[in-house]
């Protein structure tokens, strides 16, 4: 078996396929959230980070489901990314038919929409900062259907449930993970 690509190689792949700075930052946010749930084992943590970082790398070229992430999965296979990472990326979109079977699958799904929502919550704060975001405020914003209307509240709730986490704890954990890399996110 070939070596697992490094984070630097994954970041280069993200930049090769993704020009949008906001989509690149979303990838970093999802990576951070996935790592907040990752096992302590260094090799597993690396795979969880790769899945978060690359889950949407193909979105700009193939924005329609299920082309995204099916087309990206082919590229990841060609470049030697492990099956566990590729399956998690496929399973984060229900339209692919891939079932969320592993903890990584469920974590990527749970972190994707929430990371986007937390970013939206930060962007409406006076300082556009994650430091200003609190879990209780996120819960209030989730109830406001007009706020960040493209974010699926059902997916956020289902993701927390699939992780076996109360929604408030899931929000707090992902928020803390994103706050730790706020400068990289520009928030």
Image: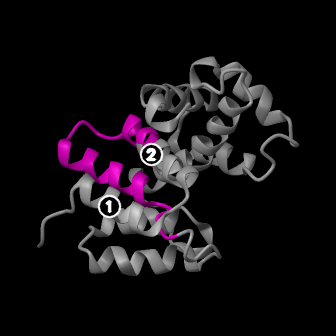
Principal secondary structure, stretch drawn in magenta? helix
Point out which mark residue 74 bears: none
At label 1, counting other C-alpha atoms closer than 10 Å, the crowd grade (few under 14, some 14-19, many 20 or more) is: few
Residue 38 vertical position relative to residue 98 in the rendered view, above or below: above
Position of the C terminus, as image quadrant, is top right
Residue 161 at least partly seen: no
Q: Which residue is mark 2?
A: 28
Mark 2 vs mark 1, CA separation in Å: 13 Å
Tell me the quarter of the picture where residue 146 sits.
top right
Residue 108 vertical position relative to residue 75 in the rendered view, above or below: above
Residue at (64% x, 22% y) in the render: 133
Residue at (72% x, 21% y) in the render: 126
Q: Nearer the viewer, residue 125 or 1?
A: 125
Tag 1, which secondary structure? helix
Mark closest to the chain's N terminus, 2 or 1: 1
Question: Residue 3 location in percent, x, y?
Answer: 13, 65
Residue at (74% x, 46% y) in the render: 153
* Colour basis: one colour
Residue 46 part of the magenta-drawn span = yes
Question: Residue 11 location in percent, x, y?
Answer: 34, 56
Q: Nearer the viewer, residue 176 or 166?
A: 176
Tell me the quarter of the picture where residue 64 sits.
bottom right
Position of the N terminus, as image quadrant, is bottom left
- Left or right of residue 165, residue 82 in this image: left
Asked whether the beta carbons under mark 2 and mark 1 sit within 8 Å of each other, the answer is: no
At label 2, counting other C-alpha atoms closer than 10 Å, the crowd grade (few under 14, some 14-19, many 20 or more) is: many
Q: Which residues are magenta?
A: 32-58
Question: Residue 85 location in percent, x, y?
Answer: 35, 62
Question: Residue 88 location in percent, x, y?
Answer: 43, 62
Q: Select label 2 or label 1 by which is in front.
A: 1
Tag 2, which secondary structure? helix
Point out which mark residue 12 bears: 1
């Amino acid at each position: 078996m070939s070596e697992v690509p490094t984070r630097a190689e994954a970041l280069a792949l993200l930049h090769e396929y993704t020009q949008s700075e906001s989509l690149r930052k979303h990838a970093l946010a999802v990576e951070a959230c996935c790592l907040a749930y990752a096992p302590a084992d260094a090799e597993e943590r690396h795979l969880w980070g790769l899945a978060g970082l690359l889950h949407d790398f193909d979105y700009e070229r193939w924005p329609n489901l299920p082309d995204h992430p099916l087309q990206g999965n082919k590229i990841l296979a060609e470049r030697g990314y492990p099956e566990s990472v590729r399956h998690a990326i496929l399973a984060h979109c229900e339209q692919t038919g891939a079932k969320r079977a592993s903890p990584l699958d469920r974590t990527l799904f749970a972190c994707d929409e929430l990371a986007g929502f937390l970013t939206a919550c930060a962007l409406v704060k006076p300082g556009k900062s994650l430091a200003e975001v609190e879990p209780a405020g996120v819960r209030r914003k989730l109830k406001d259907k007009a706020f960040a209307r493209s974010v699926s509240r059902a997916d956020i709730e289902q993701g927390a449930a699939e992780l076996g986490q109360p929604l408030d704890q899931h929000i707090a954990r992902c928020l803390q993970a994103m706050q730790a890399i706020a400068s990289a996110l520009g928030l």
